[in-house]
Amino acid sequence: KRDRYIAAIGEIVVEIMASERGDGFTEAQPFVGPFASGAPAIFIHQAALLGQACGIASCVGDDDFGRMNLDRLRISGVDVRAVAISRTRPTGSAFVRYAADGSRQFIFNIAHSACGEIAESEPLHAMVDRTDHLHVMGSSLFSESLAALTLDGISRVKARGGTVSFDPNVRPEAIADGFLHHSLPAILSQTDVFLPSGDELFIAHPGSREREALDALFDNGVTVVVHKRGSAGARYHDRALTIDQSAFPVDETDPTGAGDSFGATFLTYWLRGYAPKACLQMAAAAGAIAVTKQGPMEGAASANEIEALAKTTGALT
Ligand code: ATP
Ligand code: MG
């Protein structure tokens, strides 16, 4: 049987991290990086490490930041045929600094970087044509054209009997133009697996309670909700079942990328037909490993590492 193919469309960027916690970027300070990054890239890279057939459609600059990202994705087995190289724009970037309370501040250069040139192309079409599962990141809806490309990809994958997952991945610094909120109803109504983090569970139903929000999502056609709760773990919901998963105890070095590794791992096992409880355990193990390493992709793990940690909470079902 042919392995399913997972695809993502969106930003590939470098991340440059402030070395010291504190408030923002208004003073000269030490940084570390560049690290390979971009939410859909982190996601697809983790799927590839699990041996999953997968690819990303994106655009990078003709520069070291772009080459570093492309090399990294290629080596891990990601299909990068649909990653274009811009002749005029540099690779996108994200500067991030953690505050003392663990919250993050970002400066993004995405829509006006090479990422802004992601467009219809023959390789992108070919990728969508081989896609069984499309993963959508809210952070990738940074322009009207990206939102339109994404919605078109969703329709085509769904029309062929494929499935769609959606992680809102809301970054207040990045959604000023509101494309996420514009396309939210259309995306959610075609989402099979919804992967919100924290309050994103309520993104389409603000002010509602957990049960109401879940019922509204299921009524809207979502079949699975996997709610990421940081160091509190994660919760799986479908119409019939709720499963609670506590976080694996690890020393947190850098939480960035945990949600993306978690999502990729959940979906890879889900598409392979594992039971929800096993998918959730594997995903939580992947998320826990991810936070132990500095850099968004650096904590990506192999199936062996993930399964070894997942087994520490008991037998897999
Ligand atoms: P991202 O910053 O990548 O967008 P997110 O907010 O989408 O992250 P989180 O809830 O932070 O996602 O993390 C995803 C999962 O990873 C959690 O549900 C949990 O299982 C695991 N995880 C996150 N932080 C920790 C931690 N400190 N210790 C153990 N596991 C963790
Ligand atoms: Mg996230």
Image (cartoon, rainbow, N blue to C red):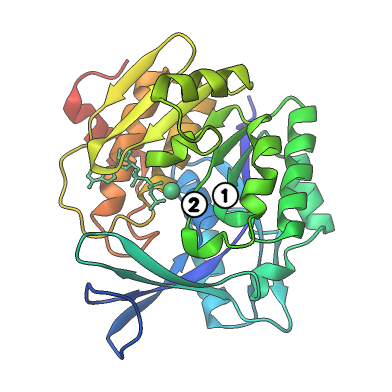
The reply to whether residue 196 is visible in this rendering is no
Residue 55 x, y percent position in the rendering: 62, 50
SS at mark 1? helix
- Do labels 1 and 2 touch, CB within 8 Å? yes
The residue drawn where x is 49% and y is 12% is 239
Q: Is residue 183 something one can see in this rendering? A: yes
Residue 29 sits in quarter:
bottom left
Q: Which residue shows up at 42% across the image and 19% down it?
A: 211
Q: Is residue 213 above or below residue 15?
A: above
Crowdedness near tag 2: few (<14), some (14–19) or many (≥20) residues, C-alpha within 10 Å? some
Q: Which residue is mark 2?
A: 170
- N-terminal of the two: label 1 or label 2? 1
Q: Quadrant of the C terminus?
A: top left
Q: Residue at x 71, y 77 (%)?
A: 86
Q: Label 1 belongs to which residue?
A: 138
In what quadrant of the picture does the N terminus appear? top right
Q: Residue at x 62, y 81 (%)?
A: 90
Q: How many residues crowd around disc 1 within 10 Å: few (fewer than 14), some, or many (20 or more)?
A: many
> What amino acid is at disc 2?
Val
Q: Position of residue 274 (x, y in %)?
A: 44, 20
In the rendered image, residue 282, in percent from the top left (x then y), is placed at 34, 32
Instruction: Farthest residue to the front: give it.
Output: 207
Ligand 1 sits in which quadrant?
A: top left
Q: Which kind of residue does numbered mark 1 sit on?
A: Gly
Q: Is mark 1 within 8 Å of ligand 2?
A: no
Q: Taking 183 as reference, is 39 above or below it?
A: below
Q: Position of residue 148 (x, y in %)?
A: 77, 51
User: Front-most of 103 and 191?
Assistant: 103
Q: CA distance from mark 1 to mark 2?
A: 6 Å
Relative to residue 134, is residue 33 drawn left or right? Answer: left
